[in-house]
Image: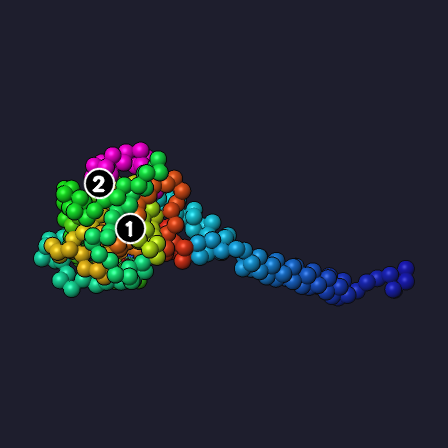
Amino acid sequence: MKGNKFIREEDVDAKSVKRKSILSFIVFFIMLFLGFATWKWINNQPTEQGALKPLRKMLDVNEKIFSTVFDSTKLAKEYPLSAAAKNVRFNGYEGIRDSIEEINWRLNVIRNNGDTLKISLEELKKLPKKEIIFDFKCIEGWNQITHWAGVPLKDFMKHYHLGTESMKKYVGLETPDKGYYVGIDMPSALHPQTILCYEMNGKALPLKQGFPLRLIIPVKYGVKHIKRIGTLFFSDQKPADYWAERGYDYYTGH
Ligand SMILES: Nc1nc2c(c(=O)[nH]1)N[C@H]1C(S)=C(S)[C@@H](COP(=O)(O)O)O[C@H]1N2
Ligand SMILES: [Mo]
């Protein structure tokens, strides 16, 4: 046997190490490329309600879990009158910048059959009045114990024979100019503490606080408490929602 048939041990090691490191390099670059491609792909997806579609899908899964876990019989904590703020904060002017007169205002309720009920503030005030003092919470990070009164949405719906409408999955509410709008899941809309509100601290709502009529829905964050309601409708599809379109959670319960 000639010496050149023998391969020295060191040579074998050096060769396999070289091969292994080339392989590692290739794998590393493939992974790098795949990571980059995925990142590119997510970024190039269309947005849906303010979030990129693949990420929105994950949010939707979260929302499903929360909306089924949400217990509509759970009451928000209520407080004594003495705890209610005298100087009530206000926040958000969307849809309420124009002036408004009570005589020109009606609550438009679109029935399932397409008819529209037009209800004046005077008529609403004849319905049983409920007061509520609760901790109003805004997503932006402030909260305040405040005092409101109006007719529970549930009682309102019974009074106006909106039984078939209450079988729908959502209530949609819009300002008269459609500048602000929210969608509420039916269990939260029919929650005993949800009111069509026309009073704050025992007086008519101030303009900034939503005169003549706003929603007070203590089981939700401030964004859902739409001020100056013009139209109310019912739907099995999620109604458009101003802040959900800008990326906030649709249900925003707490
Ligand atoms: N029409 C209308 N309603 C609205 C808003 C708005 O911009 N326009 N902002 C919402 C938000 S984010 C909050 S926190 C509450 C604040 O209610 P307040 O002004 O009575 O404190 O109103 C909600 N309702
Ligand atoms: Mo808010």
Which amino acid, mark 2?
A: Phe
Give the amino acid at mark 1.
Gly
* Neighbours of disc 2 within 10 Å: few (<14), some (14-19), many (20+): some
Residue 46 shows in this picture? yes
Ligand 1 lies under 8 Å from the Cβ of mark 1: no
Q: Residue at x 56, y 58 (%)?
A: 44
Q: Position of residue 171 (x, y in %)?
A: 32, 44
Q: In which quarter of the view is residue 200 placed?
A: bottom left
Q: Read off the magenta span.
A: 154-170
Q: Pointer 1: what residue?
A: 230
Q: Nearer the viewer, residue 193 or 5?
A: 193
Residue 72 showing in the rendered view: no
Residue located at (65% from left, 62% from top): 29
Secondary structure under tag 1 reads: loop
Number of numbered callouts drawn: 2
Q: Is residue 215 left or right of residue 149?
A: right
Rendered image coloring scheme: rainbow
Would you call the spot at circle 1 few (<14 residues within 10 Å), some (14-19), or many (20 or more)? many
Residue in the image at 57% along x and 60% along y: 40
Residue 156 coordinates in the image, percent (x, y): 22, 40
Q: Which residue is mark 2?
A: 156
Q: Residue at x 37, y 52 (%)?
A: 241
